[in-house]
Image (cartoon, helix red, strand yellow):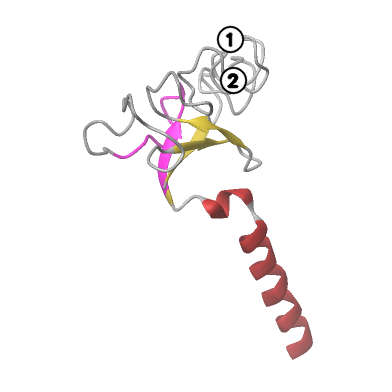
Amino acid sequence: MTTNFLVLVVLAATTICFSPVAIAQNYLGNLSANPYAPRAAPQPPGTYNNPYGNSSNSPGLYNSQGEFRGNLNANKYDPDSVSNPYGRYGSQYSPESINNPYGAGSPYNQDSPTNPYGNGLRIYGR
């Protein structure tokens, strides 16, 4: 019985340590068009629209599988920003971008912030 408990503890610790979302520090809410999904908590002014934001000082977006979907800031030069029109997470042509209506931003995608019935993307502060 104690061996099974020990195995469960080790598995839980391993899952938490190697989970991509475990890197992010605190859950702030969801970015979603769904009126019933949990909203992001109020943040200090300039948190989301920071023109100088980067990976160390901007909240990050994650889908339900824990995959990173970009930094939530207004810096169009940050390579990981959802506001960078040429970046992986901001381009309207990138399949990983919330700005692509046929990719991660599709209104039919369960994790999309534009899906009025979906969960949206989770926002984690750093």
- Check disc 1 and report the residue beneath it: 92
Which numbered disc covers residue 18? none
Q: Is residue 119 above or below residue 57?
A: above
Badge 2 marks a residue whose secondary structure is loop
Q: Amino acid at mark 1?
A: Gln
Q: Residues within 10 Å of mark 1 (few under 14, many from 20)?
A: many
Q: Is residue 57 above or below residue 50?
A: below
* Location of residue 116 in the rendering, given as x and y in whole percent from the top left corner: 51, 19
- Residue at image x 45%, y 21%? 77
Residue situated in front as seen by the camera: 112 or 14: 14
- Check disc 2 and report the residue beneath it: 97
Residue 122 in magenta stretch: no
The tally of labels here is: 2
* Location of residue 44 in the rendering, given as x and y in whole percent from the top left corner: 22, 38
Q: Is residue 5 above or below residue 15?
A: below
What is the C-alpha distance between the residues marked 1 and 2? 7 Å
* Location of residue 47 in the rendering, given as x and y in whole percent from the top left corner: 30, 34
Q: Looking at the image, is mark 1 or mark 2 earlier in the sequence? A: 1
Q: Amino acid at mark 2?
A: Ser
Badge 1 marks a residue whose secondary structure is loop
What range is drawn magenta here? 27-41
- Residue at image x 51%, y 12%? 85
Residue situated in front as seen by the camera: 69 or 4: 69
Residue 39 in magenta stretch: yes
Q: Is residue 10 above or below residue 82?
A: below
Residue 94 can be seen in this image: yes
Toward the left, the furthest residue is 45
